[in-house]
Amino acid sequence: DAKTTQPPSMDCAEGRAANLPCNHSTISGNEYVYWYRQIHSQGPQYIIHGLKNNETNEMASLIITEDRKSSTLILPHATLRDTAVYYCIAITQGGSEKLVFGKGMKLTVNP
Amino acid sequence: NAGVTQTPKFRILKIGQSMTLQCTQDMNHNYMYWYRQDPGMGLKLIYYSVGAGITDKGEVPNGYNVSRSTTEDFPLRLELAAPSQTSVYFCASGDRGREQYFGPGTRLTVT
């Protein structure tokens, strides 16, 4: 599975959109981009995933560039409860679905 | 639905002791996983299972054993506890092509 790169941390003001970047320049055609987050040492929580089209659910939107080398997770109206470590993971579906976690990116939402 | 449950929540072990971390899921998922997370780091895969009776090693299996006799349960066994096994342990479940659901974790200290 492709390696992903995220900045170590980011701040965002409450109520603003939070745009979390992820680079995955070696991603292959059948690898999906998954986003999880971990709030204060709880178990990670699934957010969203996509292959090449943009995706949206009740939690977030995922924008994947046309060349698929990078993506952005968008939290449209960040709240204090969105403060967490966010993990971007590239994974091939249909196998063992093993997740490889990096260090992730700490998002701090400030009041 | 309880989702993924883990017991115990906390445990202190002496060096050389043994213990079993319990994990149960009620979502009828075929795939189950054990991860460990050291302070400030991402999760690392210890063992995983794609169905009852089938287990396989992950990235950091040394010092651990697992079994999967039922779809619901996936216990993790530590035979001779060492200080290096002090960590937070997360169990997860999922299915082919689907997201993983994580338990709340077991915080283990070996002294």
Image (spheres, coloured by chain):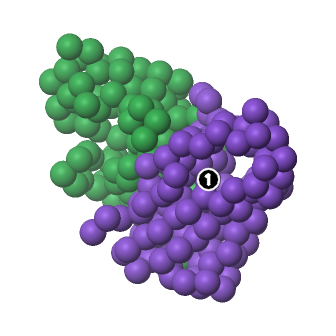
Left or right side of B5 for A30? right
Report the amino acid beneath label 1.
Answer: Tyr
Q: Is residue A32 visible?
A: no
Decide: few, some or many residues near mark 1? Use Cα within 10 Å; few <14, some 14-19, many ≥20: many
The subunit carrying tag 1 is: B
The chain displayed purple equals: B
Looking at the image, which residue is at 60% across and 43% down? Answer: B11
Q: Give whichever of B18, A53 is nearer the camera.
A: B18
| Label 1: element kind | strand
- Up-down: is B40 above or below A31? above
Residue at the top extreme?
A111
Left or right side of A58 for B66? right
Residue A90's x, y, as percent?
A: 55, 54
- Looking at the rendered image, the quarter that the N terminus of chain A falls into is bottom right
- Up-down: is B68 above or below B32? below
Residue A7's x, y, as percent?
A: 52, 26
Examine the image and state in which quarter residue B101 appears.
bottom left
- Which residue is disc 1 drawn over? B35
- Up-down: is B77 above or below A84? below
Residue A78's x, y, as percent?
A: 22, 29
Looking at the image, which residue is at 24% across and 25% down? Answer: A80
